[in-house]
Amino acid sequence: MSRSRAGPSRLIHGRRHGKKLRPGRRALIERLLPELRVVVPQRGALDARALFDPPVSEVWLEVGFGAGEHLAAQARVHPDIGMIGCEPFVNGVASLLATVAAEDLRNVRVLDDDARPLLEALPEAAIGRLFVLFPDPWPKRRHHKRRFVNRANLDACARILRDGGELRIATDHDEHCRWILDHLRRHDAFEWLARRPGDWRARPDDWPATRYEAKARAQGRQPVYLRYRRVPRG
């Protein structure tokens, strides 16, 4: 099991386990996950590109990949890109591993733990694109401090994104959307790429859909798709 700088799983809120895994999924957790797991060093930087063989041209990171549909789709379309996914929910990890095994995706690595120690360990400008898709909105005011989008995490994202790299965030929660927009507006490392309403209300063609998105729409919630560019360092 990977160990983070802050200790294993100390920062995680919410469930780590759902329904009991079927034998095939349990086997993937036991056999395949150790081969793909990202181990965050206790000290020093983590060379993200060195995690992949064959070598990759760039590394992208998804924080909280759910069932892994988006991450797997990006890995499938971009075999030259190394995809790192962070997800503490075991059932979601097992779902991604099933896809990786079925399609023999060689460019996927997994951190089955909290993402924040990984953000600390990655060197500056190590990531070309960073995805935070439908993060938990923690709607109760007393839980807002648990939201991923906050000043500290945005500082970490800005540090690890290369100049011109993209931060992509999706949400189907109106108040959370306002929270995200406000925090990004006040961060000078990010430029919002939207120029008209359709730029954030419609999912871009290179942004694969997920079951969670379909569920949100079926329940009458309108997702938004926010794209930010990492402003070049001064």
Image: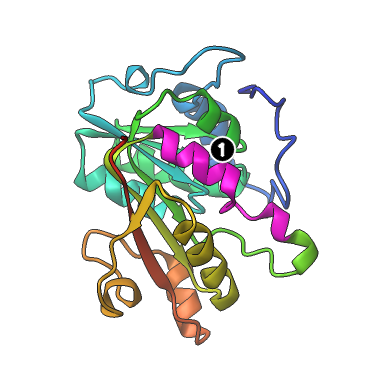
Secondary structure of residue under mark 1: loop
In the image, is residue 176 part of the stretch drawn in magenta? no
Which kind of residue does numbered mark 1 sit on?
Answer: Ala
Point out the image quarter for the C terminus: top left
Question: Looking at the image, which residue is at 28% across and 48% down?
Answer: 74
Task: Please name whichever residue, 90 or 9, is drawn nearer the observer in this view of the structure.
Answer: 9
Position of residue 45 measured from the top left corner of the image (x, y, whole percent): 48, 16
In the image, taking residue 146 as reference, residue 109 lies left or right, namely left
Task: Please name whichever residue, 2 or 190, is drawn nearer the observer in this view of the structure.
Answer: 190
Question: Looking at the image, which residue is at 22% across and 59% down?
Answer: 206
- Residue 189 visible in the current orientation: yes
Question: Looking at the image, which residue is at 65% across and 22% down?
Answer: 5
Position of residue 40 measured from the top left corner of the image (x, y, whole percent): 55, 21
Q: Which image quarter: residue 213?
A: bottom left
Name the residue beneath numbered marker 1.
115
Position of residue 125 measured from the top left corner of the image (x, y, whole percent): 35, 30
Magenta stretch, residue numbers:
144-160
